[in-house]
């Protein structure tokens, strides 16, 4: 996946009159801070130079993860939207917007009419405004609100059809999780999409949020094809991945030679409408293992997690399985050959 040309152009503009070596040093400092201080509610990006470094190093991965999640949501909801056109989101509030990566991703998937960005750090807001100024008219006119998602605030006129938040719960103190999730719930008119890193800790946060929203009456849209308790064992976790192309600048500041990076993420999307029915089906939650005459899949559905094989004896199903990718929905429930 590539980031939009306009987003790349905005990033390149940030590099003018700045030392690329200094940006690389800032990226290293930010990474160390995230590794050591996440989960304590501390400020992790402290000034404009660090905000620029964050935008260059992290925006592509966040964009790819949010876009991947949003596309899965669209796929799941399109049949529902045929009869419920009023449930298609037109407005967005992005909580913890940072430099605006999630806004770019959501705007590329939905025809938005209004965008609110909630962010606590002035430096991130200023760089975020610059980045969105290269987008369409809705992004250019986004409303930025300086507010800490972990604290109480007035938050007037910030509700929206769709509320998103990415990579925030892992930064919060554990005692702030409920107030943060309640904020997302209260701001959302129709839907919430929440992302966290694709790690055991990130998945635990997503699982906690999933149960929180279900208890409020929400229906899970993605990645789960059901709103029943998660069937994964306590030592297992569910995550997905998207491959993002790296620019020369990204390769330099992140100290890597590969022309791409794989962004791993966990997420949950819920709908605040009791009339939604996810129907049947499952989702592939691991890389398919393809060998001669056989594809091994691991899926998750309302009936639990299942590992099975699809062989070339079932030509139609085998053809579908060979094209299947990690994260895809798997609609065929009557697979028979697990030998």
Image: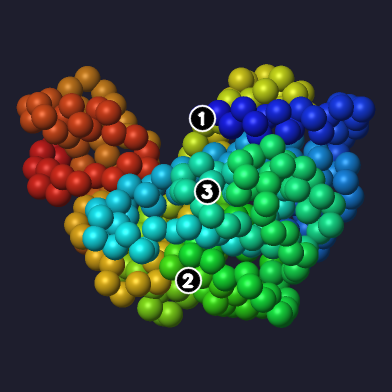
Q: Is residue 212 above or below residue 324?
A: below
Secondary structure under the numbered disc 2 in the rendered image? strand
| Residue at 47% from the left image edge and 48% from the top image edge | 111
- Mark 1: few, some, or many residues within 10 Å (few <14, many ≥20)? some
User: Is residue 30 rendered to the left or right of residue 242?
Assistant: right
Q: Earlier in the sequence, mark 3 or mark 1?
A: 1
Secondary structure under the numbered disc 1 in the rendered image? loop
Residue 109 x, y percent position in the rendering = 46, 44
User: Is residue 229 rendered to the left or right of residue 96?
Assistant: left
Quadrant location, the C terminus: top left
Q: Earlier in the sequence, mark 1 or mark 2?
A: 1
The answer to whether residue 121 is seen in the rendering is yes
Secondary structure under the numbered disc 3 in the rendered image? helix
For label 2, the residue is 189
For label 1, the residue is 1
Q: Earlier in the sequence, mark 3 or mark 2?
A: 3
Q: How many marks?
A: 3
- Disc 3 from disc 2: Cα separation: 16 Å
Q: Is residue 275 above or below residue 138?
A: below
Residue 324 x, y percent position in the rendering = 29, 33
For label 3, the residue is 106
Foreground mark, 1 or 2, reads: 2
Which quarter of the figure has residue 27? top right
């Amino acid at each position: 996946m590539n980031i939009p040309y306009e987003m790349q152009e905005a990033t390149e503009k940030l590099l003018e009159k700045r030392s690329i070596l200094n940006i690389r040093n800032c990226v290293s400092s930010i990474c160390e801070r995230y590794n050591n201080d996440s989960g304590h509610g501390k400020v992790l990006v402290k000034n404009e130079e660090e905000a620029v470094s964050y935008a260059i190093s992290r925006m592509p991965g966040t964009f790819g993860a949010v876009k991947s999640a949003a596309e899965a949501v669209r796929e799941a909801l399109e049949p529902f939207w045929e009869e419920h056109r009023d449930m298609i989101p037109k407005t967005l509030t992005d909580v913890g917007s940072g430099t605006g990566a999630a806004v770019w991703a959501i705007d590329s998937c939905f025809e938005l009419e209004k965008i609110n960005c909630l962010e606590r750090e002035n430096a991130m807001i200023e760089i975020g405004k610059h980045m969105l100024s290269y987008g369409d008219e809705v992004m250019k006119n986004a409303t930025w609100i300086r507010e800490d998602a972990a604290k109480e605030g007035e938050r007037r006129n910030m509700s929206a059809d769709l509320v998103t938040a990415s990579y925030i719960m892992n930064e919060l103190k554990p005692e702030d999780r409920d107030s943060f999730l309640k904020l997302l719930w209260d701001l959302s008119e129709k839907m919430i999409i929440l992302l966290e890193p694709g790690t055991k800790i990130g998945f635990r946060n997503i699982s906690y949020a999933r149960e929180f929203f279900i208890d409020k009456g929400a229906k899970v849209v993605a990645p789960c094809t059901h709103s029943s308790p998660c069937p994964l064992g306590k030592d297992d976790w569910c995550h997905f991945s998207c491959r993002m192309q790296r620019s020369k600048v990204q390769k330099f500041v992140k100290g890597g030679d590969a022309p791409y990076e794989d962004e791993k993420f966990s997420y949950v999307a819920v709908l605040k409408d009791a009339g939604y029915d996810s129907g049947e089906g499952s989702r592939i939650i691991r890389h398919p293992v393809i060998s001669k005459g056989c594809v091994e899949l691991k899926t998750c559905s309302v009936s639990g997690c299942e590992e099975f094989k699809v062989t070339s004896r079932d030509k139609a199903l085998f053809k579908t399985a060979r094209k299947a990718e990690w994260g895809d929905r798997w609609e065929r429930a009557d697979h028979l050959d697990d030998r």
